[in-house]
Image (tube, helix red, strand yellow):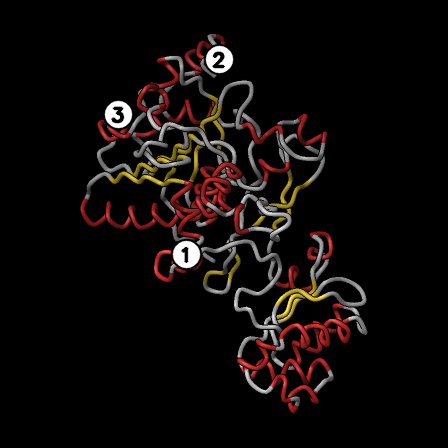
């Protein structure tokens, strides 16, 4: 790709953990220049998270690496008026500002939307918080698993015996980051059309509720109160769900009549098509336990990968449950170019950085530079703002960075 779509767009990120940094990461992958403000001496909390002790000791924890590649890092003490002044000066040079403090914090620091709009009347300002900028829960702190609990996600995750349960990955963080990135792109277009500043309010709870659209809709429009169903298919079809095999579990979806026919062929049991107990969906539902028992016995005859291939050959959606290492060994992952290997500054090693989940004009959208060490760009950014060498040294000496 000769020119990335957001080339020339500048972003100021005052965010930590995942949701905020992931939103700017998406913009960075698309070509934006992102300046990340971090706390002096500590930086983003995620710098210290991850299983590799050497990376953690270097302030480059694996969780931090996952959503900060390609950015520039400046350490600033925003409790010092000089640090706030620097942040405001940076804000005059950017198109977008992202913060994920609790509501009211940015205003107390002097970098809230009115403060930044006053120095940059074309700013797109995005505030990310647990519960949004208004409402009775707005002042509360939150993390992904808190929102999973409050939103009802935990109540419908797991089996009736194991619920409530948290999803493995912090999906609310990623849904929130993606939602913020989409909102920022829309706001940039509106800003360019009108010339006016844009204010975006992204609540993690809002994003979680939006991500449960089908479940929420079933309740508010159909009066159906969802509960945990484990690995059973939402459709209730006896030929859909998770089945044990000779090796590992296999997930299969066969909801339609055409899929049921193909399912029986792949299972090697075409006789089921003529069985009066399974003649049509209504009859199959009445006899679903009998059918599932037949399927369960047959599935144990072969390993999951072999069943996966047999079902795929018949056009039936199916996938063996894989561990993360098994997934990363798949040829499909390599073929789709989902990671970039990039050298880490100050380290005698490279690291893998995730690409965006899409291709653009045939090319994978992926980082071009690794995640930065803490304060790696203080000197260059301050110099760009007009601070001479002596002023930069004085700011460092005084603990502003």
Residue under label 1: 213
In this rendering, would 64 be left or right of 133?
right
Question: How many residues crowd mark 1 within 10 Å: few (<14), some (14–19), many (20+)?
Answer: few
Describe the element under mark 3 as helix, strand or loop.
Answer: helix
Residue furthest front in the image: 286
Front disc: 1 or 2: 1
Q: Residue at x 61, y 73 (%)?
A: 238
> What label does residue 396 carry, if any?
2
**Label 3 to label 1, Cα distance in Å?**
36 Å
Front disc: 3 or 1: 1
Residue under label 3: 115
In this rendering, would 13 be left or right of 111?
right
Q: Going from the N terminus, do you reach mark 3 or mark 1 first?
A: 3
**Label 2 to label 3, Cα distance in Å?**
25 Å
Tell me if label 2 and label 3 are in contact, CB under 8 Å: no
Describe the element under mark 2 as helix, strand or loop.
Answer: helix
Q: Going from the N terminus, do you reach mark 1 or mark 2 first?
A: 1
| Quadrant position of residue 117 | top left
The percent position of residue 25, horizontal first and vertical second, equals 48, 43
308 or 62: nearer the eye? 308
The percent position of residue 214, horizontal first and vertical second, equals 43, 59
| Quadrant position of residue 133 | top left
């Amino acid at each position: 790709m000769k020119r990335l779509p957001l080339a020339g767009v500048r972003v100021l990120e005052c965010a930590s953990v995942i949701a905020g940094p992931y939103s700017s990461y998406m913009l960075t992958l698309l070509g934006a220049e992102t300046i990340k403000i971090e706390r002096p001496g500590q930086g983003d909390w995620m710098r210290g998270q991850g299983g590799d002790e050497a990376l953690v000791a270097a302030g480059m924890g694996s969780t931090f690496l996952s959503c900060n590649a390609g950015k520039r890092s400046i350490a600033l003490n925003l409790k010092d008026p000089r640090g706030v002044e620097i942040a405001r000066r940076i804000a005059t040079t950017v198109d977008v500002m992202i913060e994920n403090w609790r509501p009211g914090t940015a205003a107390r620091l002097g970098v809230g939307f009115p403060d930044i709009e006053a120095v940059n009347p074309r700013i797109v300002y995005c505030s990310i918080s647990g519960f949004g900028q208004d409402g009775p829960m707005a002042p509360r702190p939150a993390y992904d698993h808190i929102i999973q609990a409050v939103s009802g996600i935990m109540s419908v995750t797991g089996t009736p015996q194991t619920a409530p349960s948290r999803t493995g990955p912090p999906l609310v963080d990623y849904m929130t980051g993606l939602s913020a990135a989409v909102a920022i792109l829309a706001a940039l277009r509106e800003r360019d059309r009108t010339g006016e500043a844009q204010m975006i309010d992204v609540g993690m709870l809002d994003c979680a509720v939006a991500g449960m659209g089908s479940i929420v809709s079933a309740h508010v429009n159909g009066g159906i109160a969802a509960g945990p169903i484990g690995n059973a298919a939402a459709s209730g079809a006896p030929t859909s769900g998770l089945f044990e095999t000779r090796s590992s579990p296999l997930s299969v979806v066969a909801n339609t009549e055409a899929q049921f026919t193909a399912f029986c062929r792949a299972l090697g049991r075409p006789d089921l098509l003529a069985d009066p107990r399974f003649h049509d969906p209504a009859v199959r539902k009445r006899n679903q336990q009998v059918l599932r028992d037949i399927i369960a016995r047959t599935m144990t005859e072969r390993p999951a990968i072999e069943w996966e291939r047999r079902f795929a050959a018949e056009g039936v959606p199916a996938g063996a449950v894989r561990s993360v290492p098994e997934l990363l060994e798949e040829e499909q992952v390599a073929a789709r170019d989902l990671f970039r290997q990039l050298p880490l500054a100050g380290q005698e090693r490279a690291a893998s950085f995730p690409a965006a989940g899409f291709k653009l004009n045939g090319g994978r959208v992926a980082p071009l530079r690794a995640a930065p060490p803490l304060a790696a760009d203080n000197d260059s950014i301050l110099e760009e703002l007009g601070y001479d060498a002596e002023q930069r040294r004085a700011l460092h000496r005084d603990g502003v960075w």
